[in-house]
Image (cartoon, rainbow, N blue to C red):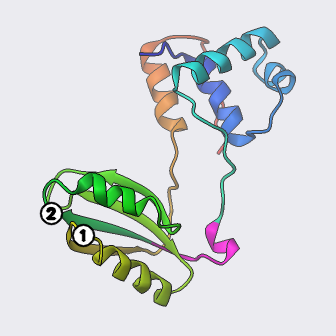
Amino acid sequence: MLSFDRLDAALLAELTHNPRAGIVDLSAKLGVARNTVQARIRKMEESGAVTGYQPVVDLPKLGVPLQAFIGAELVQARMGQVIAHLERFPEVLEVHATTGREDLLVRIAAQSQEDLLLVLERIHALEGVAHTTTTLALTTPVAYRTQPLLDKLTRESGHGRSTPAPDLG
């Protein structure tokens, strides 16, 4: 497990707020040496804790206003096959293997209700899908985030600087 402290959490907060921030800017904002910032970023990347820097895309502003969560109950021993097919669907944003009645939780995006129906029909047609349950997302009041958890973990561990990581939104 990667050693992680408040400086790491603060660095990730800055990168989350501005993934294009330069090392010098990060160093100045956090009040630490440039080499420290570079070493911390490299450590998180090499460990696999940070796997990329992606822009946050507002799909409704791009004409894709619908998101839905599909719980898929599968025929036993077909999970790998179904996941491989789902990976080919451009509308699939993410897939989680879950416990409970459904085996997979699939998050999809669609431009219209008609498009959503077409995606659902394609999912139903996959060999190995026994049953699905669809839940439409009306809004996303709390988007995917990790910073509050990282801040909590570093506060509880007592590692790093004496001040908490900045709250950047």
Q: Is residue 94 above or below residue 128?
A: above
**Looking at the figure, which quarter contains the C terminus?**
top right
Tell me residue 65's x, y (percent): 57, 77
Residue 154 tag number: none
> Of residues 21 and 156, which is closer to you in this image?
21
Q: Is residue 93 magenta?
A: no
**Residue depicted at x 81% and y 13%:** 34
Whether residue 19 is situated above or below residue 154 in the rendered picture: below
Residue 85: image quadrant is bottom left
- Which residue is nearer to you in this view: 77 or 131? 77
Q: Closer to the N terminus: mark 1 or mark 2? A: 2
Which is in the foreground here, disc 1 or disc 2? 1
| Residue in the image at 28% along x and 77% along y | 124
Near-viewer residue (137 or 148): 137
Kind of residue at badge 1: Glu
Mark 2 = which residue? Answer: 75
Query: Are there few (<14), some (14-19), or many (20+) residues within 10 Å of tag 2?
Result: some
Could you say whether the residue bearing mark 2 is in a helix, strand or loop? loop
Q: Is residue 60 left or right of residue 151?
A: right
Q: Which mark is residue 127?
A: 1
Range shown magenta: 59-67
